[in-house]
Image (tube, rainbow, N blue to C red):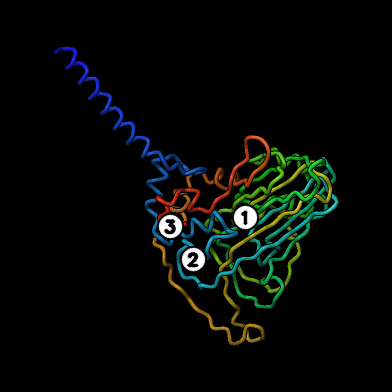
Amino acid sequence: MKTILSKRLNAAKKAKKSKTGTRKVAASAVVPRGGATVSAGRKYLSGLDAWGRCYLQLLSDPCNAPLCESVFGGSGTGNFVRTRSMVSPGNFQDTICQFCPSLFGVSEPILYAGATAGMPIATVNGEGIPYFASTSIGGSVRCLAACIKVHYTGSELSRQGMVGAALSTQPTYELTATGATLTPVTTLQASMPQIDRLGDRVHEYRWFPSMNDTNFNGLSGTSQTPLAVSTPLQEVGNALVVSVANAPAFAVTYEITAVWEYSYTQSLSSGSTLGLVQQVTAPKSANTLNDVARAIGNIGKWALEATMGGPGGFAKSIWTGAKRYGPSLLGMAL
């Protein structure tokens, strides 16, 4: 009788333990990769409304996600456009590319340069944004989401080099300041949080806005030259900087994709904008940029480890924001 009772008690304990374990597994089934802890990810993601989740998806996949309003607050224009720029620094082994949208109006938002392996950065070049820089629409613009992809275009036999990336609250001094002592790309990579071997597939890195980026910047409607300043820039937004060192010459191309919200100028002298009706829209989301930042968690990891794949242990798959965090968390149909 005692033996039968002991067996029943042991079976009950095992069943209770199994149920508890099942509940624990279910609670940690969806892990926000590149974000905060499981509990924090669930907590903050659940605080995003539908429009906040839509903007998070746009930040996570600027190339493919549906265009939508941001969570910047205040009034907007409701005019959105996605642009893509391709820059190839040329006959250099060391190259660097920077995207800083708040430089719009005073410089090119895309600056890039190259150098012989191990040598200081050579001449800095600026790249205009399609549509905005090539027309005389004028007006103002702000960036909602962006990413930089690194394409290796050389032969597999010759592939070598290191890719470095950084999301900074200041543009790179070497690219924006004339008269500065230009340092080698390899030296700059020492201060970049993310370093990987140049992979056989595309490397992709994401930009995240600062509070300064939430403001509209005026446009001149013409291409700008690289900014000529002798002191570090102030009151500018975040800059996404990507570099490649010791790669074969002519073998690296940078692809910059950005999503913009824009307005047209109201000047009568701009004939190309006459008859275009302006609009002012109210924000649809009750969330703020801080809410989205907390939902992401570790912004640096989220921005700089978005690699599409490559050799060794760092090969990853890049998904949209909804797939990255799980459909049950974002509440979106995939």
Q: Is residue 185 left or right of residue 65?
A: right
- Point out the frontmost of discs 2 and 3: 3
Percent of width and height locating residue 299: 53, 46
Location of residue 40 by image quarter: top left
Q: Are marks 2 and 3 in contact (CB under 8 Å)?
A: no
Asked if the residue at tag 1 contacts the one at tag 3, i.e. Cβ–Cβ closer than 8 Å, the answer is no
Q: Residue at x 82, y 41 (%)?
A: 158
The three-letter amino acid code for the residue at tag 3 is Met
What's the mark number on residue 332?
Answer: 3
What whole-number distance in Å separates the C-alpha atoms at marks 1 and 2? 18 Å
Residue 166 rendering spot, x and y as whole percentages: 64, 46
Q: Check disc 1 and report its element: helix, strand or loop.
A: strand
> Residue 52 location, x and y as percent?
44, 59
Q: Which mark is residue 178?
A: none
- Pinpoint residue 16: horizontal percent, then vertical percent: 26, 28
- Disc 3 is placed on an element classified as loop
Q: Tell me which label, 1 or 2, sits earlier in the chain.
A: 2
| Residue 69 numbered tag | 2
Question: Pointer 1: what residue?
Answer: 147
Amino acid type at mark 1: Cys
Q: Secondary structure at mark 2?
A: loop
Residue sticking out furthest to the left = 1
Few, some or many residues within 10 Å of mark 3 (<14, 14–19, 20+):
some
